[in-house]
Amino acid sequence: MIRRALTSSAIAALTSPRTVDHYLEQLHPMLTVDLVRARVVGVYRETSDSSTVLLRPNRAWRGFTAGQHVQFGIEVDGVRRIRCFSVSSSAANARRSFTVSVKAHPDGYVSQFLHRRLSLGTLVHLSQAEGEFVLPQPVPDPLLLLSGGSGSTPVMSMLRTLRDTGHRGRVVFLHYARSRDEEMFADELDQIAITMPNARVHRIYTRSPVPGSPLSGRITVDHLAYLDVDPTNTLTYVCGPAGFIAAVSRIYATHGDIAMLHTEYFKVPAVDPAAADMTGTVTFADSEVTVDNSGATILVQAEAAGLAPRFGCRMGICNTCAVRKHHGAVRHVVSGEVSAATNETIRICTHTPIGDVNLAL
Amino acid sequence: MSRLRRFPLIKPFSATDHDRAPQPIVGMDTVKRSPIGLEYLSYEQLDAFGAELDALRQRVLDDLGQEDADYIRRVVRVQRVSEVLGRLGIFCPFAWPVFAGGIGALALAKILENMEIGHNVMHGQYDWMNDPALDGQRYEWDFVAPSEDWRHGHNFLHHTYTNIHGLDRDIGYSTFRVDAAQPWQPRHRFNVPLALGLMLIFEFGVLLHGLERQEYRRGKISAEVFQVRRNRALKKIGRQVLKDYVAYPALALPLVPFVGWWAPLAVLSGTAVANVIRNAWAFTVIFCGHFPAEVQTYTRSDAENETRGQWYLRQLLGSANITGSRLFHVLTGNLSYQIEHHLFPDIPARRYPQIAAEVRKLIEKYQLRYNTGRLSRQVRSVLHQLATYSRRPASDAH
Ligand SMILES: Cc1cc2nc3c(=O)[nH]c(=O)nc-3n(C[C@H](O)[C@H](O)[C@H](O)COP(=O)(O)OP(=O)(O)OC[C@H]3O[C@@H](n4cnc5c(N)ncnc54)[C@H](O)[C@@H]3O)c2cc1C
Ligand code: FES
C-alpha cells in the first residue's frame, strides 16, 4: 500500500527531477522503494579461491527465478564497481535472502574483494534479478544441468530449488571442475545425490580424477551417453567458460538437437577477427570520425579511435553503453543475431559491425 | 559524409569523460600557429606551462577517492534536508518566521542543487564514482533549462571555446554587450536594466539561451534539432511548474479552513521567492566569472591551431575568481574558483582550493595575471562593463 503510494506519479510530481528514493535514502539507505539494495549478512568460504555471500535485500527486491543473475555493485574507495553474479541459492522462500557465489579470479578486482575483504553489513547496490536462463514450467523431464568451473552457480540454484519444491522428475547434474578442492558446493552436492529422488549428480575432476571413476577428461558425447542423456531430446542448461560452452554446443550440433541447449556466459566471448563481417567503415557521426571496421565490438573500435563512450559491464547487461545506430547492420557477439534496422538503439559493447555502420556517438 | 574527417586528424586534448571537450580548433592553414599568449610567453614556455598543468591535473585525478565521494554525498544530504525543511516551513504561512525560514531553506537547497551539485555533476566531476545518481550524462537538475541542452551549450561550446567571439555563445549571452569586440546594437542601451531583469528570471534566460533560436533562424541548426529541443524544454517547464506552482500549493488546500483562503497562494509565492533568490544568486556568480573588466576575449583565428598550453592560458585569462569564505565558495558551487574550474572543468570542485595554490605558484613562475577579487569588486566591475559597453562606440557613428 505505502509502497504503491510512494511510487505513484503524484509523488513523482512532487520530487521531480529526483525520485522519492533520493529522499528516503537520507532517512535510511535501505528504505528505498525502487532502488534495490542489500546488506551482506554472511560470507562463507566455499574453497580456497571462492566464497558465498549471503545477502538480505530491502523491500524493493522482487525476488528471482532460479538461474537468473543480479548486477551487484559495491563501493570501494568511493567508486562503485558493478559485476554480474548468478544467484546460487534456492528460489523457494527467496524473498528474505539469497546468496551469490564468487570465484576469485587471480587478478580480478571485485571477485578478489568479495572473497577476501568483504565485511558483514556492507551495503550492496543491486538490480532486480534478470536473465532468461530459467527453467520452463512445468519443469521438463528429463533435464540436464551442465556446468564447468564457477559456472555451477546458476544451475546449483536450479537444483536446490527443484530439491526444495519436491521435484520428482529425472534430473542429471553434471559438473566439471579441476579437482575436488576447487569445487564449490561439493558437500551439498553429495547430500543431494543421496537424498533427492531421481537426481543423478556426477562430478568430473579434469586435473585430479577420482581413481576408478568411469568418466574423465573434458566433456565428450560419451559422458552424456554414460549418464543416459540423449542430446536429441533432453532440455539442457549449460553454464561455464566460453570454451566449455563451445564444446557442448558442438556435441549438440552433431549428436543432438541444438535447440535443446540453453546457455549462460559469464564473459562475452572473444570476437573472431577473421570473420567475414570485417568490411566497410564505422562512422561515429557526432564526433565526425570514421574508421575502418576492424571486426571488434563497436565499443572497442570507438575507444581505439580516441572516443570515450560510456560503458559499464562491457558484456551487454547494464545498458550504459546504449547508443543510437543511424543505419547499418550489427551482429550480437553471443547470439550471433543480426540487427539491421535504421535508427535503433544498440549496446555497443556486445555488437560488432557488419559492413558500413553509422552511429550517434 | 563530406563533413566527416578521417581519424586521427584531430585528437581531443585529454579529458576524462568530459563531453568531447576540449577539442582544439583547427584552421585551414595548418602551418599557422596561434598567437594566443605570445605577449606573455614564448612557444616553449607555453608548452612547459601546459605540461605543468597537465601534470597537476593528473596528480589530482589520481588522488580522487573516498573523501571526494563522502564530500559530495554530504552536500547532497544537506541539500535534501534543507529542501524538505524549506517546503515544510513554507507550509506554515501562519507563522511568519517559520515561513521566512522555509523560503530561505528552499532557496539554499535550490542553490546547492543547481551549483555545487547540478553544475558540477553535469561536468562529469563525479563520473568516476560510477553512481547513477551522480552521473554527468544522466543528471537532471531542479532548473527549467533541460540539462541535456545546457550540457551542450555549457560543457561543450562554452568550456571549449571560452571567450572566443562567434563560438562561445556565453559572451554576453547573445543579449548583452560586455566586450569592445561585440558590435553595438540599439538594444545594448538597456544593458543594465535588462541584466537586472534577467537576474530575476535567470533560469528562463538559461533555457532560452540553450534553445539556440537565433542559430536555428540563421540555419545553423536544423529544424529537427530545434524541434526536439523545444519539446524537451516545454516538457521540463511543465514538470517544474507543476511541482513548484501547482502540486505544492495544492497540498496547502487542507490548510484553507484553518489559515484562510490565501494559504495555497502563500505557498506558491514562497516557492516563487525561493526560485527568485536562487536566480539572482546564480546570475551574480556567473556574470562575475567572465564579464569583469580585464577578462580577455579572442577571435576564432586567434585560437586556430592553439596548443594545450595556449588553451590553458586562454582559460586563465578569460576567467575571474571571487574571494570569500568556505561557505561562500560552496554556495557558488566553487565557481568562485572560476579560473581553476575553467582549467580543469571535470575535476571535483572541492579540489579547486588545493589546485588554486599550485596554479598561483605557476602564475608567479610565468609572471602571468590572476584575476581575483571580492564579490563586491567583481560585481562593480561587471556593472561598469555593462554600462560602458551600453554606449554606442564613437567609431561606430555612421
Ligand atoms: C550473467 C553473468 C553471471 C555471472 N555469474 C557469476 C557467478 O555466479 N560467479 C562468479 O564468480 N562470476 C560470475 N560472473 C562473472 C563476474 O561477473 C565477473 O566477471 C568476475 O567475477 C570477474 O570480476 P572481477 O572484478 O574480479 O574481474 P575484473 O577485475 O573485471 O577482471 C580481471 C581479469 O579477469 C578476467 N575476467 C573477468 N571476468 C572473467 C570471467 N567471467 N571469466 C574469466 N576471466 C574473467 C578479465 O579478462 C581480466 O583479465 C558472471 C558474469 C555474468 C555476465
Ligand atoms: S557496457 Fe553494459 S551493456 Fe554495454
Image: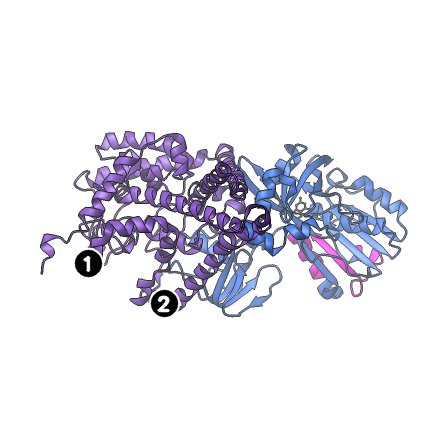
Chain colours: A blue, B purple
Density class for disc 1 (Cα within 10 Å; few <14, some 14-19, many ≥20) is few
Looking at the picture, how far across and down is residue A351, in whole percent?
A: 54, 60
Q: Mark 1 belongs to which amino acid?
A: Pro
> Is disc 1 in contact with disc 2, using a CB cutoff of under 8 Å?
no
Please tell me whether residue B285 belongs to the stretch shown in magenta.
no
Q: Which quadrant of the figure contains the C terminus of chain A?
A: bottom left
Taking the spot 49% from the left edge, 32% from the top edge, the residue there is: B67
Taking the spot 68% from the left edge, 50% from the top edge, the residue there is: A3
State the mark number for residue B186.
1
Q: Give the range drawn in magenta.
A: A223-251
Looking at the picture, how far across and down is residue A195, in whole percent?
A: 90, 46
**Separation (CA) of disc 1 from disc 2:** 29 Å
State the mark number for residue B279.
none
State the mark number for residue B222.
2
- Would you say B79 lies left or right of A123 here? left
**B41 or B66: nearer the viewer:** B66
Chain ID, mark 1: B
Q: Do labels 1 and 2 share a chain?
A: yes
Q: Is mark 1 on a helix, strand or loop?
A: helix
Corner quadrant of residue A237: bottom right
Corner quadrant of residue A224: bottom right
User: Which residue sits furthest bottom?
Assistant: A341
Q: Is residue A348 above or below residue A18?
A: below
Q: Mark 2 belongs to which amino acid?
A: Ser
- Would you say B104 lies left or right of B396 here? right
